[in-house]
Amino acid sequence: MNNDLQERENWTSKLGFILAAAGSAVGLGNIWRFPYVTGENGGAAFLLIYLIAIILIGYPVMVAEMSLGRKTEKNPVGAFKNLAPDTPWWLVGALGVFTGFVILSYYSVIAGWSMAYIVQAANGFTSEMDFAGLFGGHISSVGEPLLWHATFMGITIGIISAGVVKGIQKAVKILMPILFILLVALVFRSVSLEGAGEGLAFYLAPDFSQLTWYSLNEAIAQAFFTLSLGMGAMITYGSYLSKDDNISDSAGYVLGLDTLIAVLSGFAIFPAVFALGLSPDAGPGLTFITLPAVFAEMPLGTLFGFLFFVLLTIAAITSAISLLEVVVAYMVDEHEWERKKAAQVVGIVIFLVGIPPLLGYSALSDFQFLGMDILDTYDWFANAIFLPLGGLLTAIFAGYVWGARNTADEANKAEGVLSVGNLFGVLIKYVVPVAIGTIMVVGIWQTLAG
Ligand code: PHE
């Protein structure tokens, strides 16, 4: 089918767009990554610099991406081509499409672990279990993780095949409220446990001696990942946005919702972890090793454990669809593929690209890159290089090539509460590029230096 003959789909309401973009933002990044990164970087002090990064760097880049998308009504490659024809700027869009591809391939593997843990939790976590062994055993097997990885990609492909309104918007309108209710229930459970106070203090009373330069790095990288920035997801979602929406406002809502969910995840996790005398700095294993130990001990733990992994899976689905949509929109717009076919073909290829990281804990465990397994290697390339580079170049493009003024005008098009102006110009032209440039250099150097 030739796409030129079709009207571009639009979100049918302001809320539809906000929920879809917030659904993209809220994901494993909020519930799995944010708590463990915060736990490793000393808690409250990290939370503070993370919030600053979200506002000073995340917000302007999000406004720029959504504006680029709505202005051009195109996928990331088409958006840059449209505003800067016959220049190499489209390569920034191409980097974004490629990044979406890479992130979804391993994101789906982790989401698969979460699905497997729904079943584990339903069978009950008990105190005599060896949770490190359980998790290690799961990820180093092949059949089960592969089945869940395939199931997760299947769900993602199904939603994207159905389209922007009937697929994405419908899914997020159902899933996002459920996610919120589940999370609030978990927070109540956690903070009402005996001994929760210590966890609250860790999370809320800053101790700046815990911070290192590397924490700053982590805060900015976390801001990009959690807000789905630097790879064109917000360009793509913005391309389905009606001209009657105010982007300065919408970006504010998305940022607010994403931050709310991340902060609530911390409230769901730290008090419970401390109440049970466990440590919050377990790294990526916090969700899959420490938390099941928490659920094993607490009253109604099986129920809450089950709900937690349902929550984590839902959050992962609403993000995964945005990752797949970036690549699908590119195939549909630029190569005139039919949406269903694009979703299926691209989805299957991404599934295959996810197999090496999945096998990195079993058949391919000998493979190491700078001391990282395959999944961590994919993740490192995405977070230390692709997303910040994409964000940096997008900021430069919006600030200097398209122009900060034009970007702001697009963002402020309709009546709204917020409106971006001179401060936005300063942030997008100077603060964002300098901050990202610095963290990229420091981050890459630190990793290479081990
Ligand atoms: N923001 C998602 C999360 O927090 C991950 C993501 C990154 C989604 C980039 C889309 C694009 O889990």
Image (cartoon, rainbow, N blue to C red):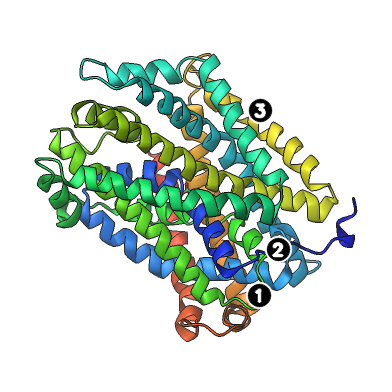
Task: Work out whether residue 38 or residue 268 is closer to the camera in this orientation and state it.
Answer: 268
Q: Quadrant of the C terminus?
A: top left
Q: Which residue appears at 29% of the width and 61% of the height?
A: 49
Mark 1 and mark 2: span between their CA atoms? 10 Å
Q: Nearer the viewer, mark 3 or mark 2?
A: 3
Identify the mark nearer the N-term, 1 or 2.
2
Q: Which residue is mark 3?
A: 352
Say whether marks 3 and 2 touch (CB < 8 Å).
no
What label sits on residue 206 in the rendered view? none
Q: In the rendered image, which quarter is residue 324 located in? A: top right
Q: Which residue is mark 2?
A: 89
What label sits on residue 401 in the rendered view? 1
Identify the mark nearer the N-term, 3 or 1.
3
Say whether marks 1 and 2 touch (CB < 8 Å).
yes
Say whether marks 3 and 1 touch (CB < 8 Å).
no
> Residue 353, image x and y in percent?
64, 30
